[in-house]
Amino acid sequence: MIIFNDTVIVDETIHQKWLNWMQKVYIPAVMETGHFKSYQVLTVIDSPNEGVTYCVQYSAETIEDFNHFYSKHLHRLQDIHNQEFENQFVIFNTLMKTVD
C-alpha cells in the first residue's frame, strides 16, 4: 500500500474553516480522481509548531496509482488549495510504503 501524506500547519485563526473546506471540497476532489482507495485526517497532538498541524493521508494500491494522480491531478488541486488559503498554511508531502 502506498500512503501519500500531506502535513499541513494551518494558522490557528482559520483552522476550523480550513478543516471544513478540506472535508467538503478538497478531499472529495482528490478521492473523485479514483487513484486512492481511502483517506484519513489526523491532527498532531504534540506539534512544536505554531498553528494547528494536520496530516491527511491518502492510500493507493500501487505506486502507479499515485504516479497517475501526481501527473494528472496534484498540481491543479494544489493550486486550488493555495488560492483558497494563501499565506495561511505551510505544507509538505511525504510518500510512504507500508511494510508487510
Image (cartoon, rainbow, N blue to C red):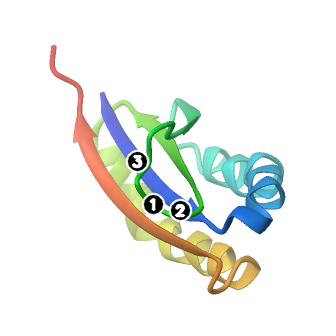
Image spot of residue 17 (x, y percent) = 84, 59
Residue at horizontal 75 percent and vertical 51 percent from the top:
19
Image spot of residue 39 (x, y percent) = 56, 34
> Label 2 vs label 3: CA separation?
13 Å
Residue at horizontal 57 percent and vertical 32 percent from the top:
40
Please tell me whether mark 2 or mark 3 is closer to you in this view: 2
- Vertical placement of residue 66 versus 37, above or below: below
> Label 3 vs label 1: CA separation?
18 Å
- Vertical placement of residue 20 versus 82, above or below: above
User: Earlier along the polypeptide chain: callout 3 or callout 1?
Assistant: 3
Q: Which residue occupies the foreground of this view, 43 or 63?
A: 43
- Tally of numbered discs: 3
| Amino acid type for the residue under numbered disc 2 | Ile
Provide the residue designation for mark 3. Answer: 5
The residue carrying pointer 1 sits among few (fewer than 14), some (14 to 19) or many (20 or more) residues within 10 Å by Cα, namely few
Provide the residue designation for mark 2. Answer: 9
Label 1: state its secondary structure: loop
Provide the residue designation for mark 1. Answer: 49
Q: Which residue occupies the foreground of this view, 57 or 49?
A: 49
Report whether 75 appears left or right of 10.
left
The residue carrying pointer 3 sits among few (fewer than 14), some (14 to 19) or many (20 or more) residues within 10 Å by Cα, namely many
Please tell me whether mark 3 or mark 1 is closer to you in this view: 1
Residue at horizontal 48 percent and vertical 40 percent from the top:
58
Image spot of residue 51 (x, y percent) = 59, 62
